[in-house]
Amino acid sequence: MNEYSFVGKPVPRPDAPDKVAGRALYIHDLKRPGMLYGKIKYSEHAHAKILNIDTSKAERLPGVRAVITAYNTPEVRFGFIRDNIALKKEKVRQFRDEVAAVAAIDPEIAEEALELIKVEYEELPGVFDPEEALKEGAPLIHETDPQGRPKKDNWVPVSWKFNAGDVEEAKKKAKYIAEDYLETPPILHASLGTSGCIAEFDLQGNLIIYTKTQIPFLAQNDFNRALASMGLKGKNTRVIVPTLGGSFGSGLDTHGYEYIAILLAYKTGRPVKIVLDREEESKTLSPRQSTRTKILQGCDENGRLLFREVRMLLDNGAYTSWGATTPSVMMLPISSIYRVPNVFYEARHVYTNNTYCQAMRGYGNPQAAWAIETNLDHLAEEANIDPLDMRLINKNIPDDISPMGLRITTCGMEECLKAVAQKLNWKEKRGKGRNKARGVGIACLFHVGGSGRVYRSDGTGVILKIDDFGYATVVTGAIEMGQGLVAALTVATAEALGVTPDRVMVVTGDTATCPWDVGTHASRGAFTACNAVIMAAQKAREKIFQLAAEHFLNRVNFKLSQMKKKDPNFQIPDLGINRPLEPEDFELKENVLYLRSQPQNKYLRMGLDELIREAHFKEQGTMIITEAFYDPCNQMLDKDTCIGNLSATYIFGAQGAEVEVDLETGHVKILKYVAAHDVGKVLNRHSILGQIYGGAVQGLGFALSEEYKRDKGRMLNPNFLDYKILSANDLSFPIEVELVETMDKEGPFGAKGVGEPGLVAVAPAIANAVYDATGIRINSLPLSPEKIALSVRRLKKE
Amino acid sequence: MKRVVHFTLNGFEVEQEIESHKMLLDLLREKFELTGTKEGCGQGECGACTVLVDGLAVNACLFPALEVEGRSVTTVEGLIGEGGRLHPIQEAFVEAGAVQCGFCMPGMVMSAKALLDETPNPTEEEIRRGISGNLCRCTGYVQIVDAIKLASQKLKGDGRG
Amino acid sequence: MNRFDYIIPKDLEEAISLVKGYGLEARYVAGGTDLLVRLKQRALRVNYLVSLRRIGELKGISRENGSVRIGGMTTFREILRSEIVQSHLPVLIEASKVLANPQVRNVATISGNICNAAPSADSLPPLMVLGATLTLRGPEGDRTIPLEDFFEGPGKTRKANDEVLLGLSVRMPDQETRFSFQKIGRVSQDIAIVNGAIAISLEKEEVRSVRLVLGAVAPVPLRLRGVEERLTGQRLTGHLLDEAQKMAEKEVQPISDVRASEEYRRHLSGVVVRRLIEKASGIEDL
C-alpha cells in the first residue's frame, strides 16, 4: 500500500475557521449596491382558478419598485419536464403557487405590499392522495401537457420499470414469501441556512445570479432558457454560489423564487434579493417525496433470495422536478442489494394538489431501503432465519455483475455486517430482550459510490494553476455545501501534486470562471473532483519536471556560484551529474523538488516556487496551468430496459441499533447506534465521520420524528417547533462507526463517495430493532411515539 | 418609531438609531453589519442567532433591540482576537472536525461559550443540554460535543474565558 | 410582523398608565419568547408593546410568612438557580428544567408562561398543584386570584389587558405532601403533548389528600377532580392505579392537533397520571 503524506491524516478543514468565526458569507449576508428586496405572494388555495389579481394598491405603496404577475411578465417555463411556470396564470395547483411578487426598497415594505395585492379565486375541487388522483373523475391537475396537448389523467409522463428474470416463475419456486405495504412521508431538507438569491443584469442583458444551488451549470442552462423566454435569446447567465448553509438535495433544481427574482431584476433594472424565511422555506421548497411501496420478496428453504417485486406510487405533487428521476437510484438497491436473480420494479408518479417534491440526500434510496430492509426482516422471520444470517447468505460480493448491469468491483458488505453484529453483540442480544422491550436491528445499504450518471455528462472539470509563490489554486465547478469537498480537494491536490495542504487554495462556485460540473449530488463531489484534480496534478507534474530538466541545474549552479562569491572559502561540491537531466530524474514532494537519485543532497533541492519563478521571469517565460475533465466510466440507464452501470463503483454498509421501547408512551430509546461503511479509502477521517454521524442523525429523524404534515395540501408544521429534527438532547447514546477500506481502483486514492449513505439504512435498522423489542411492525414512517403506543394499546385490547 | 439605543458591543460603547419594533438580530446584522450572527428560523427554535447579553445566551431574533440599552452584547465576532486569532472554543471546533455547512456554528460557539463560562468542566450530558437550543442539520452533534470537551481542556490551559 | 412601537417605561406606574391609555392597541411584553413569535407569525397584531423587563419590583424570589413569593418578571433561569425554589418547590424546578431550551429559559418569565395561558405551559401544572395565588395590579389597584381560577381558555385569562401580573405566591408545602412532575413530548425538547403534576399526601399508603393537574389535555390546565376524589381516602394499590389511569383517560378533554391525536393524548393522560402517583408516592410496580 502507498504511504501517503496527507491522505487519511487529520488535516483540518480549510473552510472551518471562517465558518466558526462568522466570516463565511451566505446568501443572507450578501448585499449589492442599489439592491431591492423581493417577496412572493402565494396561492390561498390548493386548487383554484385565478379570476383577477388587483395590484393597484400595492403599486402605490411608497418604496415599492415593481409588482409583477403572470399578466405583466413573459411566461417563464421551468422544471424537469417544463410543466411549471414562474408566475401562475389562470390556475393555481398547490398552496405554494406563486401568483404575484413585489420588489421594494426594504423587505418590510415588500411584505406590506403583498398584503395589498388582492387575488380573486374560484376554488376547484382538489385531490391530495395519489390513489384518489388516479380514479375516474378525479380533478385534473393539468389540463394539458407542457407541449399543450390535452391531458386525460393525472399520471406524470415519467415512469420507471425494470424487469430481470421471471418473478412469477420464482414466486412458484419460493418456499417463503413476505409481502408488505410500506409508506414514507414527505421530509424537509431543513437546511439551517434557508434558500435565496440575488439576481441582477449587466447592461448587455446578461444575468448575474448569486444563488444557493448545487448545480450551477445546469442552473446556467435553465436560466439561459428563461432569458430566451424573456426575449433575451443568446444572452448568458453567470451563476455565483455563496457559502451554502446546507442543501441536502434542495439545490438540485432551479426554483420559482429564482425566476421571480430574475423577472423583478429585469423589470426594475436593479439587483433583487429574495431570501426565504423559515416558514416559506418549509412551505415552498420541495420536500423529499413520499412513497407508497408494495414489496414482495421470496427465498428458498435455505434463505437464498429468489425474487424481489416492488411497486411504488409516488406523490409528485403539482409539478415535476428532477426528483422524478429518483426511482433510477431507488432501482439500484431494488435490483441489486443482495444477490437476487429475479426482480420486478415499477415506479410511477402521480400529480396531486400537494406541494411538488424533489430529491433529498439519498436520492430515493432511503425510501427504497426502508421497504427492502424491513420486508427482508419479515421474510427472515417467515423462514425462521436470523436476520443477520439472512443478510450474510445473500450478501453482495466483489467482482459481480447485478441483474441491472451494475458492475460491483470492491464490496465490503460482509465486513460491514460482521462489524455491526460484533459491536451490537448480536448473537447475545437478538430475540432475547422482549420482556424488557429491548431489541436489536440491522439493515444494509447499497448506494452509488462513484457518481451516478443521471445526466448525459457526469463529468467534473478542474483547472490547476501554480503561482510564483508555489501555491496551487484549484478551480472547479463542484460545490462545497458543507460536506467537505474543499477539504477533500485540498488533501487530494497536496498529495497528487506534491505540495503541502497549506499551499492549496480551492476556488468554486462561479460558472464564469470554473470549469463545468454536472452538480454536487450522488455523493459524487469528492469522487469526481478529486479524480479530476489527480489528472490535472499529473499534467502539472509533467510540466514541472520538464521545466526542472531545463532550469533546475542552471539554478543550482547559479546558487553555488553565489555562495562562492559570498564566501571564498566555500568549496563548490561535485554534484556527480555528468549528463543532461531528464524530467524522469525529478520528484516533487511537500513543495520541494529534488533528484530521485540523490533525495538527500541539500544542494540538489529546490522549492517549487523557486523553479516556477526561474521559468516565469525570463524572456518568453512560462507558467504552469493545467486542466482536466474527469467523466467516470459509468453509463446512463438504457431508456427501455433501465440496464446500465450507473456508477463507477458502489458503496456498501450496514447499520444497526439497540433500542428500548417505552411501551406506554411509545418512545424509542436508542441505547447504541452502530454504522459500518465501506468507504473505499479514508481521505479525511474527520470529514467521513462527520458525514456518517450527520447522515445517521438525519436518518434517525426520518425514522422517529420527522414528518411534513398537511391537510388538504396545506402544510401544518412549517417551523422547527412542529417539524421535529433531532437536537443534541436526543442523542444521549453512543454512535460507533467502523470504516472499512476496500481500496477501490476507480476512486481517488481508492476512496468512494460517502455523502449520502449515512442515512440510507437508519429507518429500517430502527424499525427492525423496534420489532425485535416489541413484536410490533409499524409500516409507515416515522415510528412516532404515538403510532407505537397506540399499536401496543390496540394489541393489548385484542 | 425610531429610537436610539446605547450599549456595549463586543467591548465598544456604541449608540444607534433603530426602529423600535426591530430585534437585536436586525440591529446587529443591518446596522452594524455583524453578519456572523445568523437567522435560521426567526422564532427562537434553532439558536443560529445566539449571542450573549450580559453573559447570558439569548436568541437575538426574539430579543427586542431596545432591550440591550445599557447592556453588554457579545457576538461571534467579539471572540476573535488580534490578527484574526480564533478563540480557543473556535479552535476546538476546527480541530475536532465539528464544522460542516457552518450556518449553525456562530450560534453553537456562543452557546458553548455561555456553557463553559458557567460550567468549565461540563459532563457530556451538560454539554448536550447546553447546546439543546442550537439545531444542526449536518453534523449529528457528535463532533460538536467532542469540540466542546476539547474547548474545556483548552480553556483550562489558556486562562482566558 | 407589523411595525409596532416598543416602549420601555421607567416604572410600573408608567407601564400601567401607558397600556390603560392605548387600550387594546397595546400589550405588556415580558420575555417575549412567545408573544414575539406570535407577532412574527402574524397571529397577532399590536401597535404598542410595553416592556416590563426593567421594572425591578417585578423581579425576585423571597420567603414571606410561610410562603414563597416569585415576582412575575423572574426568568426560568433565575427560578432554576434559586435556592428557595430548589429547597421548597422542587417540583417547579423539574418543570422549569424541561421548559424549552437554555436561550429561552434565560429570558422567558414566569409571568409570560402564566399570562400566555397556553394549555401546554410546563410551569402551570406544578404551580396549580402547589395552590399558587396570583397578584395583579391594574389602574384600579391590586387584586389576588387563585391560579386555578385564572384561565378561561387557550390564550385567555381573567387578567384585564391593562393589568400586570405582579407575581405569585405559594404556601410552603408541609413535609408530608409529595410532588412529582411529568412531561411527554415527541422528542426530548418539545411542547408538551401531555404534562402534569401531582401533590399527594399519604398516611401509611393511604391517600389523605391529592391535587392532580394535567396540561395540554383541555382548553386550560385541567384539575382531574374525578381522579382526585377516587383516590382520596383509599389505599394505593395496583388496582386503584389502574382505575385512576382509566378515569384520567375519560376525564380529560383533549383535541387532535399537529402534535398528537385526541386518542393518544387520552392514552398518555392515563400513563402520566399513573407515573405521577408512582413517582410521588415512591411506590412503583403496584
Image (cartoon, coloured by chain):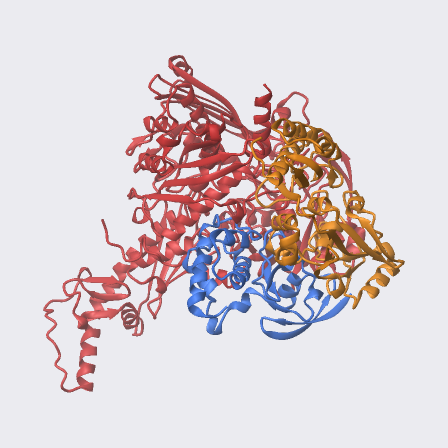
Question: Where, quadrant-wise, is the C terminus of chain C in this rendering?
Answer: top right
**Is any atom of residue A761 visible in this view?**
no
Placement of B34 over or under A333, stated as above or below: below
C86 left or right of C70 in image: left
Expressed as whole percent of the image width and height from the top left, the position of residue C94 reads 62, 48
Expressed as whole percent of the image width and height from the top left, the position of residue C96 reads 64, 50
What color was chain B assigned in the picture?
blue
Residue in the image at 33% along x and 46% along y: A751
Outermost right residue: C140
Expressed as whole percent of the image width and height from the top left, the position of residue C68 reads 72, 55
**Is any atom of residue A325 visible in this view?**
yes
Outermost top residue: A172
Residue A639: quarter of image: top left
Question: Where, quadrant-wise, is the N terminus of chain C in this rendering?
Answer: bottom right
In the depicted view, which residue is nearer to us: A85 or B28? B28
What color was chain C assigned in the picture?
orange
A685 left or right of A572 in image: right
In the depicted view, which residue is nearer to us: A570 or C192? C192
Residue in the image at 54% along x and 52% along y: B129
Outermost front residue: C204
Placement of A85 over or under B28, stated as above or below: above
In the depicted view, which residue is nearer to us: B114 or C241? C241
Expressed as whole percent of the image width and height from the top left, the position of residue C140 reads 90, 58
In the depicted view, which residue is nearer to us: C74 or A607? C74
Q: How many marks?
A: 0
B68 left or right of A667 in image: right
Placement of C131 over or under C4, stated as above or below: above
- The chain that appears red in the image is A
